[in-house]
Amino acid sequence: MNNRFTLKDFFFTVLLLVVITVVVLALAQFNYEGRQILRLSHRVQQIGQQQLREIQLLQQLPKNGVAAPRAGPAPDSAAAAGGPIRTTLANGWRYVCYPQPPLPPHNPYAYPDYSPGDWLVLNLASEPKKIAPFITQDEVGYEVQNWVLESLITRNPKTLQWQPWLARSYKISPDGLTIIFHLRRKACFSDGRPVLARDVVFSFHTVMNPQVDAAPLRGYLSDVKSCRATGRRAVTFRFRHPYFKALEEVGGITIIPERVYHFKNGADFNQHGARLVGSGPYVLGAWHRGQQLVLLRNPRYWGPYPTFNRIVFRFISNSQAALQEFLNGQIDEDAPTPDQWIHYTGQPGFSKKYICYKFLPPTAGYLYIGWNLREPMFHDRRTRTALTMLIDRAAIIKTFLHGLARPMTGPFNPLSPQNNPHIQPLPYAPHAAEQLLRRAGWKMGGDGILHRGGQPFKFHLMLRAGDVLLTRIAVYIKQQLARAGIAMNLEPYEWSVLLQRIDQRRFHAVLLGWTGGIEGDPYQIWDSASIKDRGSNFIGFNNRQADKLITRGRREMNTARRMKIWHRLQAIIYRQQPYTFLFTSDQLDFIAPRFRNTRPYKLFGVSEGDWFVPAALQKYH
């Protein structure tokens, strides 16, 4: 039988092709509709999340007014619009009013994917000795306090303007001797009770109580003549003399509730080192000594809605261990050493996976060696100058910091107008240093050690235990001094013990750092009045000319003239060399990739309070 393709076969073939085509088109249509449904479902989910965020923010609006303030052309129109007022009144008083608390310039609420929730897990590198207000004396304690305690004003990190915070407004008299604050009616402590003028007065008098361990803070407020409640929510500060940081210092006092912290004598107040109660966005949850400290979101917070459910602080002193915890996702931010920065940012893909920042703001602090001037070996200027000239600081910056630092010539950041640009770092000059030591009376002994008056040139350098970078730098300095016949032994101490020995003035020399600022008040560290009462002038620097310049500078309200005074002060400190100023280093930061809105401010660096995690990326629920 022959196989022939008949008309009937042709008909069935065409019919089959039509059926196949219809099926293919139907499948394509179903696939397209499926994708559209998925997209629609995702969009509905996004809208739902956005509505949830808006509802959360709207719930806060009647309570705290998170709307961004608007600048107005005139006081009347600004007040009508609910925006800030900055003006000079007819009587010459400067008046600033923010009807609503200001939002940060990097406003997280403006992001379409903003969502509250998640945790922020940070490393403090060392455990605070105390976290109670006013008696905390280490930077890690202040880091904890910043989330819990608040002050009358806050500084805009972008414009540097002082903005009312717990205060709704402030007025400054034409002579600068009187400042009046009016508190916000909605401002309240974490128990829901209002922040009142009596709490401000109590906070001020607590700082000024000589029995309270707050000597560094008292120095800044020494020119305040009186602090009085002039109404339920009005406070008036009066000064004996003009003071260039008057607004910053009285407005920056952290305000604590009198009913919680009331005490009969300062010794009682000093005993409660773990008591932390304020008006801020977080409250103290738990402090597990040696492990971690936990802050919880304040459910009664009066201000803009806090983003994170909790802030967790861990205490990892070893830099390698801290970095490993960061890479393992156990902490959310790490300040790498220069070695770590160079190694990891040089790896392909690391900077794409993690958020990495390197910057040097004018607020960066500095590292130094402080010589205890009570010790006979450090009495004369020539010896201290020689010690500085024996240390190759340029080699330290190149070798240990990979060039990520700048040398210091004094206590002011080289990017700050306070710094004297005409002063150059002392050179690394071992031969000239040895000549200075001979003129200072030091002679080489048979043991290979310098001697003077029968005493060998031997001393101990205190430093924080567990800091690998500082230890390496200290070992290098020890080797350099040894070549000149100076025996320096390292004394590493746990942070709280080191601070205790400093308070007791029980040390020869110490390797430490100070934090910085746009324009600092040198009184705290360099005035002879700050030597006593556990003040920050723990090395005992006592120079009559420096004291006079500090007093003049504090009372000089003209910025240009004041900077010239600070430049002269720096020249005196440079000549006397009470510190060996080492360097100010770049700020290095690794941040977990799930966070948003992390970019640093040019003048202040990163601000974790601006950060948030989109809902889809949140890790802790």
Image: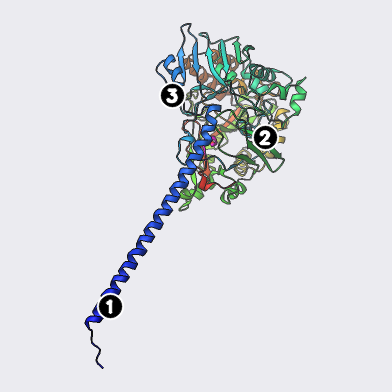
The spot of residue 598 in percent (x, y) is 49, 39
Q: How far apart are marks 2 and 3 (CA)?
A: 34 Å
Q: How crowded is mark 3: few (under 14 residues within 10 Å), some or many (20 or more)?
A: some
Q: Can residue 425 be seen in this view?
A: yes
Magenta-tinted stretch = 608-612
The spot of residue 126 in percent (x, y) is 66, 39
What is the three-letter code of the residue carrying label 3?
A: Arg
Mark sitting earlier along the chain (2/3) = 3
What is the three-letter code of the residue carrying label 1?
A: Phe
Q: Distance between the residues labelled 1 and 3?
A: 77 Å
Answer with left or right where residue 145 lies relative to residue 357: right
Above or below, 205 against 28 in this view is above
Above or below, 502 against 172 in this view is below
Callouts 2 and 1 close, C-beta under 8 Å: no
Q: How crowded is mark 1: few (under 14 residues within 10 Å), some or many (20 or more)?
A: few
Residue situated in front as seen by the camera: 616 or 86: 616
Answer with left or right where residue 47 lies relative to residue 331: left
- Residue under circle 2? 284
Label 1 element class: helix
Mark sitting earlier along the chain (2/1) = 1
- Name the disc covering residue 70, or none: 3
